[in-house]
Image: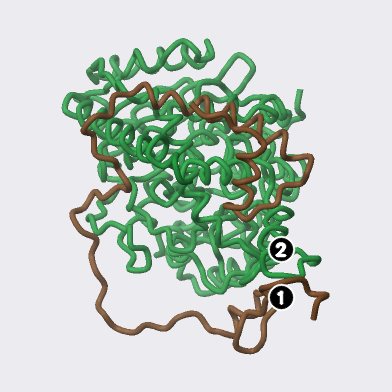
Chain colours: A brown, B green
Amino acid sequence: MTRIDRDVVHHLEKLARIDLKPEEVDTITEQLSRIVTLVEALQKVDVTGIEPTQGIAHEAAGPLRADVVTPGLDRATVLAEAPDATKEFFRVPRVLGRGDES
Amino acid sequence: MSLSDLSLTDLRASLVKGDVTPVDAVDAALAVAKARDSEVHAFLDVHSDAARKRARELTDSGAYKKLPLGGVPVAIKDNLCITAEKLTCGSHILGDYRPPYTATAVEKLLAAGAVVVGKTNLDEFAMGSSTENSAFGPSKNPWDTTRAPGGSSGGSAAAVAAGMASAALGSDTGGSIRQPAAFCGVVGVKPTYGRVSRYGLVAFASSLDQIGPFTRTVADAALVLNTLCGHDARDATSASAPVPDFTAVLGQGLRGLRVGIPWTFLGDEIDAEVRAAFDRTVDAVKREGATVEEITLEYCDKGLPAYYVVANAEASANLARFDGIRYGYRAPEADNLNDVYTHSRRNGFGAEVKRRIFLGTYALSAGYYDAYYRRAQQVRTLIIRDFARAFERCDVVMLPTAPTTAFKLGAKSDDPILMYLNDVFTIPVNLAGLPGMSVPAGMSSEGLPIGVQLISRAFDESTMLRAAAGIERVADFPTGAVAPAKKGR
């Protein structure tokens, strides 16, 4: 149905926020094409009028917990795992432009 | 017989009698890990000091005698959080991450007196069928270390098979407990979707993932399930269904059970020895008084393509959280926010994870959503109906667990589709949210274990375990066997 080519893969790189290494592009293009061909088998199934299953709900409704405040994770402990943080916040490099433009 | 060769049930009996202490049991497991794990590589991290300390505390207090898993050494797949212990998911992207909380399933084992001996190897983010996708190198099959232990929970299966733990936790999204259990000659159970809380499990595909145990006997699995199952307010998908004593029915045998076999779904691409072991098991269950019904699972041959759309679409969303901001690895050269994302993810994720994120992203992208994602979800509905119809005529469905025995390391790692075909018999069970398990049923001429898979109705693990216990008694496999230490051939 669709051909996976390098343009499609470059578009997916943007959507998935993964810059592939140059040597990865051809491999993943070829492999994705083969996997999509496998997945095309789904097109042969008559699904007219069949509701999609989005998740498994064996029980009519999940039990709800009481609406009370419970302790969350300790902020300092959580921030200690961040690659970069202040005492209160995660820290990231500048959002716009290059770091050397400041 | 060494202490590490005892089944969990027998080890508990020895502990309760006072013949051995938790210190003895944990030391025995750690000794096997020390002797064999340089070759098997089941563990990513052995918690020797913490395990010895806890075993000493349990021994001194004596509390272990009354706890259901008191003093039992267990191993945990390294996609389950334990407070302040390194968590990798078999990936570089988590860096030196140490989670600030413990998974409910692990908490329950600890509350029952178990002792965690370490974290086990896995395919990166549980994506794979051989553990060869681990960023830290593959695990080996303890029965033949030139072969894969299966995956993705291959480290947990190998640890139990080699006697490095009496039980281990794994996760199963498309067969990641059952297939390595079959390859390693142990029991592996994927409970009903919602049976076991997933709080603290790193998500792969949220509508499919389920945590379950590896053990060397069916009775051991029932004991661990008694501890693991039950509602948890911290997991919104956790079910409130009552939890029976899973050990209660194990002695009831196969007589009167209706075993459904979807002969046409078996196809002809099964390894001849796996098929022969399956056929012998069918004969055995008949001899033991079960009736065998032919059933049809019309759409289950579309399970594999439906799974690779649904699972990877969900994975592409779940793995968006690994962005170099809140934890784990950040690409050091990135000097703006977008590069933090795109470079950290490029360097941090391995090839299979990227492949799956790309496929999932493709299936969810504008213009393809209906053709792939929605259609896969519709096929999922048809697979659910297949099983509903089957269970009108039988109590358990029986299938091979995997089409082959353990394959050579490297044999399938260059061909993703060949690797995916490992899971053809296990995937439909996840799509339908049903319980499934693998129990050793035979041994190949090369000395490799062969498993059969049993599937039951939702929340009816008891019937599945009862059938498995019946098969275990008559199977051509030494019940509870630890894989003997030997060189690969």
Percent position of residue B330, x then y: 72, 66
Name the chain letter of the residue that bears numbered label 2: B
Give the CA separation, mark 1 to mark 2.
9 Å
Task: From the viewer's side, name the closer residue of A36 and B193.
Answer: A36
**Element under disc 1:** loop
Give the residue at x 65% y 44%.
A10
Q: Residue at x 58, y 50 (%)?
A: B125
Q: Is residue B308 above or below residue B210?
A: above
From the image, which quarter does the C terminus of chain A lie in? bottom right
**Residue, disc 1:** A93
Q: Secondary structure at mark 2?
A: helix
Residue nearer the viewer, B53 or A97: A97
| Residue B339 falls left or right of residue B129 | right
- Determine contact: label 1, label 2, CB under 8 Å: yes
Which amino acid lies under the numbered mark 2 shown in the image of this protein?
Asp
Image quadrant of residue B229?
Answer: bottom left
Q: Is residue A1 left or right of residue B389?
A: right
Q: Quadrant of residue B297?
A: top left
Outermost residue toward the bottom in this view: A87
Above or below, comparing residue B235 to residue A51 in the picture: below
Q: Residue B339, labelled with which disc?
A: 2
Q: Is residue A44 above or below residue B224?
A: above
